């Protein structure tokens, strides 16, 4: 099936038609579309995007928001048909941070999800290879924690001044 | 630094002073470096082997093999994971060997004092020469090499005596 080329505005209308009030468009730019969804429908939205030509996941990551007590996960997907990037965001709880993997929809997010798992402490369910990617092999999560969390204590890595021999 | 002078315990220790001096004179003109280019000081470091600074006229010939090198150069920030590999390369180098550290990151973590990932080189191996700067100019790295030559020439004897030869 050949898809008709569209711009971010058209995609936002399509998403509104399909998912209604459960999608919030946060930013609409010339070649970018940012929107927020509930986690319950995130996989449906992802599949919807894939069917509409968004075939290449270019980035994925997360942000920690301790005041709101959530971790915000985002996926950035580029489309070879429409030539713009759509950013899908959803919140997960900070007490029990877990979400199901998106590898079955976009295989390219494999390493990004690994990175999010180790740096933010988010459990990615169904991921085939959750092993350390960027952190050193002797890293201990119990002792040192997750580096991209806002409550990560980095002062322990500060070297004292004046210890030159 | 005591660690970099371990070779003195070997055969050379029994040699007369004159021959030792000759050895050191030879070494000072063939400081072959193995470089670990891990950070953004590398453009400045690359300038050194171009026509303008031409460090090879002092006998500094960059090599890819650690087994034939005398100097180990850290160019830029060194991560914890990199340090494991760097230590292995350092252990492969034959004695005598010197360590030369370029830039603020590798010397003291520079602008990232609380980084969970960066380490200071001096915590892991004896360092003979630091070059400050972020990044240091090629002139500074060049000057550091001349100072390192001076250090090789002015090797401290067991009895603490030291001959002063100036290269700069």
Image: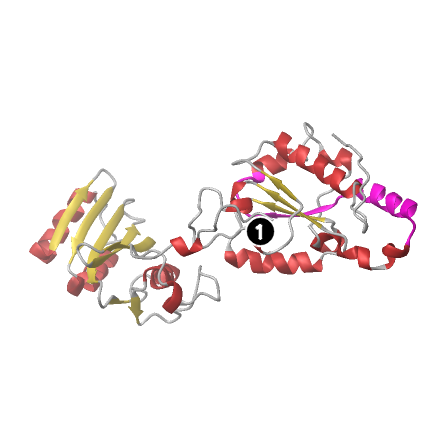
For disc 1, the marked residue is B121
Q: Residue B22's spot in the image, x, y percent?
A: 88, 43
Left or right relative to B85: residue A31: left
Q: Nearer the viewer, residue B119 or A97?
A: B119
Image: A27 above or below A127: above
Q: So how many labels did they put on this image?
A: 1
Q: Quadrant of residue B111?
A: top left
What residue is rendered at 72% in x and 35% in y? B146
Extreme residue toward the top, this view: B52
Magenta stretch contains residue B167 = no
Q: Residue A110's spot in the image, x, y percent?
A: 37, 63
Q: Is residue B60 visible?
A: no
Q: Residues within 10 Å of mark 1 (few under 14, many from 20)?
A: many
What residue is rendered at 81% in x and 59% in y? B9
Q: Nearer the viewer, residue A47 or A36?
A: A36
What residue is rendered at 37% in x and 71% in y? A128
Q: Which residues are magenta?
A: B15-42
Magenta stretch contains residue B22 = yes
Label 1, secondary structure: give it. helix
Q: Residue A67's spot in the image, x, y percent?
A: 18, 54
Image: B65 above or below A7: below
What residue is rendered at 48% in x and 52% in y? B118
Q: Residue B90's spot in the image, x, y percent?
A: 67, 56
Left or right relative to B67: residue A33: left
The chain carrying label 1 is B
Q: How are the residues colored?
A: secondary structure
């Amino acid at each position: 099936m050949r898809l008709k080329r569209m711009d971010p505005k058209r995609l936002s209308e399509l998403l509104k038609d399909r998912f209604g009030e459960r999608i919030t468009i946060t930013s609409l730019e010339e070649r970018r579309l940012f929107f927020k969804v509930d986690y319950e429908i995130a996989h449906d939205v992802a599949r919807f995007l894939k069917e509409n030509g968004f075939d290449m996941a270019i980035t994925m990551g997360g942000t920690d928001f301790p005041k709101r007590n959530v971790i915000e996960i985002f996926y950035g997907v580029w489309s070879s048909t429409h030539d713009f990037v759509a950013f899908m965001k959803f919140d997960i709880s900070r007490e029990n941070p877990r979400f199901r993997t998106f590898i079955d929809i976009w295989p390219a997010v494999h390493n990004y999800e690994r990175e999010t798992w180790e740096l933010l402490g988010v459990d990615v369910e169904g991921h085939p290879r959750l092993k350390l990617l960027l952190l050193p092999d002797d890293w201990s999560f119990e002792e040192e924690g997750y580096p991209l969390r806002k409550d990560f204590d980095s002062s322990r890595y500060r070297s004292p001044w004046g210890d030159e021999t | 630094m005591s660690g970099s002078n371990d070779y003195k315990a070997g055969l050379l220790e029994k040699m007369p002073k004159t021959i030792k001096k000759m050895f050191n004179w030879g070494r000072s003109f063939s400081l072959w470096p193995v470089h670990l280019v891990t950070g953004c000081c590398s453009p400045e470091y690359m300038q050194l082997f171009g026509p303008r600074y031409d460090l090879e006229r002092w006998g500094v010939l960059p090599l890819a093999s650690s087994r034939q090198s005398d100097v180990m150069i850290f160019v830029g920030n060194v991560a914890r994971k990199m340090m494991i590999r760097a230590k292995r390369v350092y252990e492969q180098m034959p004695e005598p060997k010197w360590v030369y550290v370029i830039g603020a990151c590798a010397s003291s973590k520079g602008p990232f004092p609380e980084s969970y990932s960066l380490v200071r080189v001096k915590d892991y191996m004896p360092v003979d020469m630091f070059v400050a700067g972020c990044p240091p100019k090629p002139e500074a790295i060049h000057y550091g090499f001349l100072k390192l030559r001076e250090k090789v020439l002015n090797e401290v004897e067991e009895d603490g005596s030291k001959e002063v030869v100036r290269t700069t």
